[in-house]
Image (cartoon, helix red, strand yellow):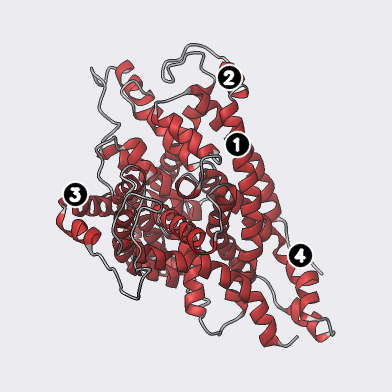
Amino acid sequence: MSAAMRRRAVLALPYAWLTLFFLVPFMIVLKISLAESVIGIPPYTALLATDGWQLHVSGESYRRLASDDLYALAYLNAIKFAGVSTVFCLLLGYPLAYGIVRAPRRWRSLLLLLVILPFWTSFLIRVYAWIGLLSGNGVINNTLLALGLVHQPLTLLNNAFAIYVGIVYSYLPFMVLPLYAQLEKLDPALLEAAADLGCRPWRAFCRVTLPLSLPGIAAGALLVFIPAVGEFVIPDLLGGPNTLMIGKVLWDEFFANHDWPMAASVAVAMLAVLILPMGFIRRLLQGETA
Amino acid sequence: MINRLSPFLAVMLVVGYAFLYGPIASLVVYSFNASRLVTVWAGFSTHWYVELMHNEAIQRAALISLEIAVIAATGALLLGTAAGYALQRYRRFRGRALFGTLAIAPLVLPEVITGLSLLLLFVALEQAVGWPQGRGVPTIAIAHITLGTAYVAVVVEARLAAFDRSLEEAALDLGARPFKVFLVITLPLIAPALAAGWLLAFTLSLDDLVIASFTSGPSSTTLPMVIFSSVRLGVSPQINALATLFLVTVAVLVTLAGRLMNRPEPKS
């Protein structure tokens, strides 16, 4: 077998699979977002009429997307929740990753494993754990009451605070791992040189460590931000029934309203927001091989 | 002494790990609570574990989830290994940029989009070619294979990038055929990554709620779907018990996988 044929044999199956089950579905989402919602199976109109070649394009769902403030608000909310959570993930994750790098060598792999471990346990169950902690008669409120720090339970669940906690908690490992990978590569000699030249540690951090860890910060931030924008489970379980986040809106359009074209156009619009950061993340993750 | 753990970093490590493990610890503790109220401690009891053993809905769902996870992890291992190999070893081929995007996109794409788009594909396929008839275990498995492939590809790619190619080259120089080189040299060397990739795809499948909800049918309720509908009604100690069993299993599996990954490469 020639080299070219071998390549084709290796590539054919994953390429075909990903095209059929990842690329083509997007085309279909795009198509159905342009259809009209009807009652029936399936609940949308055909784009090509059966009697001819006339295109039946309806911009109805996009018109609603643009005119109903609910959708704009849900998008802005999602970006706000994801963005603020990303910043908090960074503030917590950076010292954590740097601490692991600086820890004694024999601890390092264990510390790293402990960051990865929650990622291997059920995401749903980790979100669920916070309900028990944050609810009105939950662990945190009971502790605060018992200590006499508060006199009546704080509202910690079913609000924006709970969503932030949920996102930061669930996505923290995604921030720590790329940061660790980047900080570990950093040559300690650079910091020694800075110190020898009279640079104070904080200044050395700002001038040397921080700039050199920027690719890790970017990768971590994108790995947190992109999926968090479309998050459904966290706002649904921790944010309460009135949370407006675009992932939840898409879910409700589909499962509650059975409006497939609307759900599809919400997905298209979400993708339009995320396509740029997704391009960046591909560069960062496949940087060395691309 | 530049390269030392400063007090600030030491405190942050403690805070970070407390944040990561506090909620998990409270889950485990309250799974042994005698009271139905998850938050009031009323003595040690294994009552909820016994009740879990008699919950047929959860057991049925767990079996379905396990079946899907095994199929999905195995499929993702095959496709993801090929994809990771191609991305690492074939520098230039037509459509490489598209392939790279396709192989990595499921990793970060919000699950609601992946789920919705796959469901719409299945519906369109059923209309066009009559397959798949309805939705169930096969459609969820296909969706999870697609998701898992991306993760396996990344793990395999990283492992391939790290290992010494001279062994492969030596085998080729000695006249071994490329396929034999792959089987005898490459495969054993990347075996730890394959094991980790399989486990990762397995766990992802077992854990997925959103994509499974879109692509499931009436007879294929998975474990996360049962947990989700139960959690939506409020906190239940049975779920705590289930979570604890899950955590123990994962801890054992990850320790095993860690042993595999950290095993030194055999010196030829």
Q: Is residue A232 visible?
A: yes
Label 4 to label 3: alpha-carbon separation? 54 Å
Amino acid at pointer 3? Leu
What chain does mark 2 sit on?
B
Mark 3 Cα within 10 Å, few/some/many (few <14, many 20+)?
some
Marks 2 and 4: CB-CB under 8 Å? Answer: no
Task: Judge depth for marks 4 and 3 and give the one in front.
Answer: 3
Marks 2 and 3: CB-CB under 8 Å? Answer: no
Amino acid at pointer 2? Glu
Q: Which mark is residue B62?
A: 1
Q: Secondary structure at mark 4?
A: helix
Query: In the rendered image, which quarter is residue A62 located in?
Result: bottom left
Q: Which mark is residue A157?
A: none
Residue annotated with mark 2: B51
N-term mark: 2 or 4:
2
What chain does mark 4 sit on?
B
Query: In the rendered image, which quarter is residue B65 located in?
Result: top right
B49 relative to A181 in the view: left or right: right
N-term mark: 2 or 1:
2
Marks 4 and 3: CB-CB under 8 Å? Answer: no
Residue annotated with mark 4: B188
Q: Secondary structure at mark 2?
A: helix
Residue annotated with mark 3: A70
